[in-house]
């Protein structure tokens, strides 16, 4: 049992390092090669954990090899479009100007139900309102509506508005983020003044406090009640 | 870019190390074969005590190498060879003596072990 415990720790740390090394894209939508590697790694890692008769290296070695392959392949895909197309394929147009391309639907083995499901996820019920429906290489369908069906924007209305900027968190669950405080050009004197104005004595009593570039403050005091 | 170079470097290093490992294992297996062959000849000549001693020496050599093999090979396959050595020694030290089949069994166990690491079409597929 001690051996299994140690093996689990080693495999976990190796997987953690591998995923970190492969980058953040590994954690989002998976491309084909990434999906293959994620599936393989999860399966390979489990074997030496379950069977003590298999050397740990039998699990670690494939993980390291897969990690290297993914890093090399991702680099090649960034440099060469041909490699990218060969590995991931190309996006293809399933709907053009409200008309479903039946050839592409068959070619990509997408059923009407699946397409309708993808459209519903994006709150589109009428295919006729779609200008472009693109099947991306990660399997998602992206929809661009016809101009007559798009939501009205501020620019369409001819209005102008002030950008509120990106809110910077200053206190996160009672923890003062000093770096962020400096980033938004404030100091602790200003912070304590703001806290005092809200009848709070210490940052530890604040659940969330953020400031945007126009000086707007979002403030939420920590609740004391216990469930 | 650095990550890709590291990836390529690690893959090459692993491949070279694994090839070296195969070479080391082949050498060790050949040394064991030689000792087993010698023991078999001695046993055929009726020198059972010497044959048992030669097999025991080969077994010691195998045991000193088994830590290395346990890290790299399936444990049950490694134990199979260890078991084969002890069976052969037991047969040689008993009054019945060992047959050619006992020696062949040990040789085959070692061959199976090495075959799984050797870079051959059969091993890969």
Image (tube, rainbow, N blue to C red):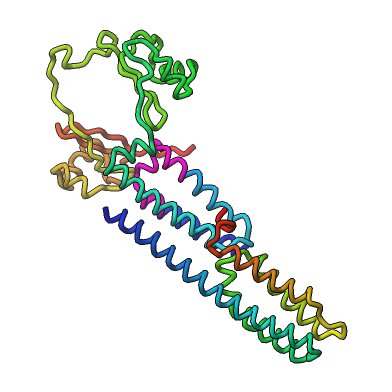
Farthest right residue? Answer: B95
Considering only vertical position in the picture, is B28 above or below A183?
Answer: below
Q: Nearer the viewer, residue B117 or A166?
A: B117
* Magenta stretch bounds: A18-37
Q: Nearer the viewer, residue A105 or A56?
A: A105
The majority secondary structure of the magenta stretch comes to helix
Considering only vertical position in the picture, is A30 above or below A100?
Answer: below
| Residue B96 in view | yes
Position of B86 with respect to B14 (left or right) is right
Q: Position of residue A76 (x, y in %)?
A: 31, 46
Q: Position of residue A64 (x, y in %)?
A: 44, 57
Q: Position of residue A79 (x, y in %)?
A: 26, 44
Total number of numbered labels? 0
Position of B39 with respect to A91 (left or right) is right
The residue shown at (37%, 28%) is: A136
The residue shown at (18%, 41%) is: A193
In the picture, which quadrant includes the N terminus of chain A? bottom right
For residue B74, what is the image quadrant?
A: bottom right
For residue A135, what is the image quadrant?
A: top left
Verify whether residue A138 appears in magenta: no
Considering only vertical position in the picture, is A216 above or below B75?
Answer: above
Position of A106 with respect to B80 (left or right) is left
| Residue A2 in view | no
Verify whether residue A36 appears in magenta: yes
Q: Position of residue A66 (x, y in %)?
A: 44, 52
Considering only vertical position in the picture, is A128 above or below A135?
Answer: above
């Amino acid at each position: 049992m001690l051996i299994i415990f140690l093996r689990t720790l080693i495999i976990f740390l190796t997987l953690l390092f591998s995923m970190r090394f492969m980058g953040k894209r590994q954690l989002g939508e998976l491309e084909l090669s990434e999906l293959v590697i994620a599936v393989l790694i999860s399966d390979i890692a489990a074997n030496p954990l379950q069977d003590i008769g298999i050397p740990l290296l039998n699990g670690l070695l494939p993980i390291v090899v897969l990690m290297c392959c993914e890093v090399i392949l991702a680099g090649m895909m960034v440099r060469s479009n041909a490699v990218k197309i060969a590995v991931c394929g190309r996006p293809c147009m399933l709907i053009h100007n409200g008309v479903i391309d039946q050839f592409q639907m068959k070619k990509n083995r997408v059923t009407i139900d699946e397409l309708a499901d993808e459209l519903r996820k994006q709150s589109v019920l009428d295919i006729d309102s779609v200008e472009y429906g693109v099947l991306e290489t990660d399997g998602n369908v992206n929809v661009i509506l016809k101009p007559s069906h798009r939501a009205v924007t501020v620019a369409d209305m001819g209005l102008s508005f002030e950008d509120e900027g990106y809110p910077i968190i200053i206190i996160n669950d009672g923890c003062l983020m000093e770096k962020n405080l400096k980033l938004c050009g404030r100091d602790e004197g200003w912070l304590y003044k703001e806290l005092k104005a809200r009848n709070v004595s210490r940052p530890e009593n604040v659940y969330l406090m953020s400031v945007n570039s126009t000086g707007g403050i979002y403030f939420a005091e920590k609740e004391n009640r216990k469930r | 870019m650095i990550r890709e170079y590291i990836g390529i470097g690690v893959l090459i290093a692993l491949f070279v190390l694994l090839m070296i490992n195969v070479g080391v294992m082949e050498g060790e297996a050949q040394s064991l074969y030689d000792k087993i062959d010698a023991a078999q000849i001695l046993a055929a000549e009726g020198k059972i005590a010497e044959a048992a001693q030669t097999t025991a020496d080969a077994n010691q050599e195998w045991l000193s190498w088994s830590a290395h093999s346990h890290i790299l090979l399936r444990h049950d396959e490694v134990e199979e060879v260890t078991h084969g050595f002890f069976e052969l020694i037991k047969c040689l030290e008993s009054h019945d003596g060992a047959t050619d089949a006992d020696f062949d069994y040990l040789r085959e166990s070692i061959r199976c072990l090495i075959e799984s690491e050797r870079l051959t079409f059969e091993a890969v597929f």
